[in-house]
Amino acid sequence: MSTYGWRRTKANELITFGDVEPVNLYNETILRKAKQMNIDKNLGLLDKVSDLVASILALKYKSEFSGIIRETGLDKFLVIYFSPNSYFYINNSIEQKKQAH
């Protein structure tokens, strides 16, 4: 659920039209941050890695991302990633072009 949708649902539960907004109704910025922290926690990044590059390297070696993040680099920061389907499509296209020549 989006942060906007969650906040709107919660506001409908707590207040009626014309009421003053209660202080315990979080604003969208707080909700977005909480959502991002939850995603980071589920990926295993919370409290372990605070550096962006180290975070990407940690993701590269996790089993669910090992086939997606292909290369990383620091001397010109880069991350090369492909879904398994796009990787297959690219390699297939290259092979077809080689056979055509």
Image (tube, grey):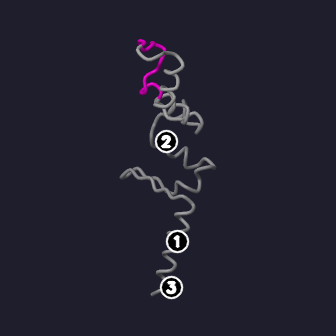
**First in sequence: mark 2 vs mark 3:** 2
**Nearest-to-viewer mark from 2 and 3:** 3
The residue sitting at 59% across, 53% down in the picture is 66
Q: Does the CB distance between marks 3 and 1 fall below 8 Å?
A: no
User: Which residue is outermost to the bottom?
Assistant: 101
Element at badge 3? Answer: helix
How many C-alpha atoms fall within 10 Å of the one at disc 3: few (<14), some, or many (≥20)?
A: few
User: Which residue is outermost to the right?
Assistant: 63
Q: Which residue is mark 2?
A: 54
**First in sequence: mark 1 vs mark 2:** 2
Element at badge 1? Answer: helix
User: Which residue is outermost to the left?
Assistant: 76
Q: Which residue is mark 3?
A: 99
Q: Can you tell which mark lies on residue 30?
A: none
The residue sitting at 56% across, 67% down in the picture is 88
Residue 17: image location, x then y, percent: 43, 17
How many C-alpha atoms fall within 10 Å of the one at disc 2: few (<14), some, or many (≥20)?
A: few
Q: Can you tell which mark lies on residue 91?
A: 1
Give the distance between the C-alpha atoms of the residues marked 2 and 3, in whole angstroms: 41 Å
Give the distance between the C-alpha atoms of the residues marked 1 and 2, in whole angstroms: 29 Å
* Quarter that holds the C terminus: bottom left
The residue sitting at 53% across, 74% down in the picture is 92
* Image height of 96 relative to 16, above or below: below
Q: Please, what is the three-letter code of the amino acid marked with disc 1?
A: Asn
The residue sitting at 60% across, 36% down in the picture is 42
Give the distance between the C-alpha atoms of the residues marked 3 and 1, in whole angstroms: 12 Å
- Asked if residue 1 is among those painted magenta in the image, a careful observer would answer no
**Nearest-to-viewer mark from 1 and 2:** 1
* Quarter that holds the N terminus: top right
In the image, the segment drawn in magenta is: 19-31
- Asked if residue 24 is among those painted magenta in the image, a careful observer would answer yes
Magenta stretch secondary structure, dominant: loop
